[in-house]
Image: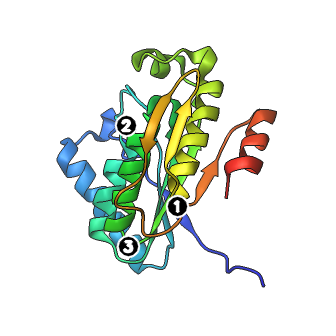
Amino acid sequence: MTAPLTFGYLYDFRNPAPWDKPWSKRYHEILDVIAWSEQAGFSEAWIPEHHMANDGYMPSPLIAMSAIAAKTTKIRIGSGIALAPLHNPVRFATDCAVLDIFSEGRIDIGLAIGYRKRETAAFGVDFTKRGKIFDEWLQIVSGLFAGETVNHDGTHFQISGAKLMPPPQQRIPLYIGGFADKSVERVIRYGD
């Protein structure tokens, strides 16, 4: 059986200088467009993550996704993508679980390692180690999303007795992006 073709849109919440508006106004206008897109038949809203962009490219996708969940009822809401190495895996999984509950099981999570050195530098993450960080991160988050109690003694994370409580409403799908061969390995191992 073939799944139906669906349409979604990526909302980056940018506020470029030539059309600059107060941030609150810009954000609320975008939320209104997303609510309208649900009524118009779009099935997904995707929120990317970048930091320190002059036009305000969305730096906090999970917070934006929470606002979208409050303004919609059926559209799926996804990070497209979240920069995994910049997040603590237990905090990220916990926030996703709560967001999934608020959205009544409408969350999809897209992840990648990122490519901007200034972002990793600002977060104190070694750019050359972001792939290895991501590999450990995926082990931890995948286990948490599967309902496991996670203990992890790795190079980048030491986790003891982590468990999602409350658990997400669904097994949150993980979509993994990237351009390197290693990305395909991650997709095969962890991706949906």
Report the number of discs.
3
Tell me which residue sits at (34%, 70%) in the image: 35
User: Is residue 167 rendered to the left or right of residue 9?
Assistant: left
- Which one is earlier in the sequence, the residue at label 1 or at label 3? 3
**2 or 1: tag closer to the N-terminus:** 2
Disc 1 on helix, strand or loop?
A: loop
Most extreme residue toward the bottom is 1
Q: From this viewpoint, is residue 71 visible?
A: yes
Kindly indicate whether the residue at mark 3 contacts the one at mark 1 (C-beta within 8 angstroms). no
**Looking at the image, is 153 positioned above or below residue 98?**
above
- Give the position of the N terminus as an image quadrant: bottom right
Q: Position of residue 176 (x, y in %)?
A: 64, 47
In the rendered image, residue 143, in percent from the top left (x then y), is placed at: 56, 50
Q: Nearer the viewer, residue 40 or 89?
A: 89
Residues 12 and 72: in front is 72
- Kind of residue sitting beneath label 3: Glu
Quadrant of the image for the C terminus? Answer: bottom right
Q: CA distance from mark 3 to mark 2?
A: 24 Å
Image quadrant in which you'd find residue 161: top left
The residue pinned by badge 3 equals 104
Disc 3 crowd, CA 10 A, few/some/many (<14, 14-19, 20+): some
x, y (%) of residue 36?
Answer: 35, 73
* Disc 2 from disc 1: Cα separation: 21 Å
The residue sitting at 74% across, 48% down in the picture is 189
Comes first in the chain, label 3 or label 2? 2
Q: Mark 2 belongs to which amino acid?
A: Pro
Residue 59: mark: 2
| Residue indicated by mark 1 | 172
